[in-house]
Image (spheres, rainbow, N blue to C red):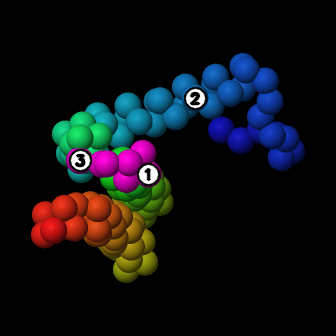
Amino acid sequence: MADQQGVMPRGPGKIWRAFMWSCKGLAVAFRIESSFRLEVYGLIVLTPLAFWLGQTPIERAMLIGCLFLVLSAELLNSAVEQVVDKISPEYAVFAGRAKDMGSAAVFLTMLNVLAVWGAVLWPRLTG
């Protein structure tokens, strides 16, 4: 939730409320979005693997960070879909395009996961 008159959130109370809103959003996404759940399960499986396969802290951060990008893109895509469905419950070309573009963003972050994991692991597998 945004503050009134563009004032930045300050103080532990506002930070705590912002944290709780974020947790609420994560919980709702996990409950109603099967794609988000699947991606969370992937994160749970791949994170320990990233710690095991990553040889440096930077490699580990890259392997895990790209997984969080997928979750972020999925949350944004789900938010777009929720708003589009609320505004335009019947089929509309622009609504369909918005949903397709959100889906494409998630797809690109998944390709990024393949690229990062491949770039980190390929030299070890072939060398």
The N terminus sits in image quarter: top right
The residue to which callout 2 is attached is 19
First-in-chain label (2 vs 1): 2
CA separation in Å, label 3 and label 2: 32 Å
Question: What amino acid is found at the position of numbered circle 1 in the picture?
Answer: Ile
Residue 20 place in picture, x, y as percent: 55, 25
Task: Specify the label residue 97 is tagged with.
Answer: none
Give the residue number, with chain letter if any, for mark 3. 53
Q: Tag 2: Cα neighbours inside 10 Å, few (<14), some, or many (≥20)?
A: few
The spot of residue 45 in percent (x, y) is: 19, 39
Q: What's the magenta region?
A: 53-59
Residue under the image location 13 percent in, 69 percent down: 126
Image quarter in which the C terminus is found: bottom left
Secondary structure of residue under mark 1: helix
Please state the horizontal and vertical placement of residue 87, each as a whole percent of the image.
47, 60
Q: Which residue is at a point 42% across and 45% down the rendered structure image?
A: 57
Q: Residue at 73% across / 20% down in the picture?
A: 12
Disc 1 marks which residue?
58
Q: Where's residue 3, x and y in %? A: 77, 38
Distance between the alpha carbons at the discs numbered 1 and 3: 12 Å
Q: Is residue 54 left or right of residue 21?
A: left
Q: Amino acid at mark 3?
A: Leu
SS of the residue at dot 3?
helix
Cβ atoms at labels 2 and 1 below 8 Å apart: no
Determine the residue positioned at 43% across, 78% down: 94
Pointer 3 and pointer 2: residues touching (CB < 8 Å)? no
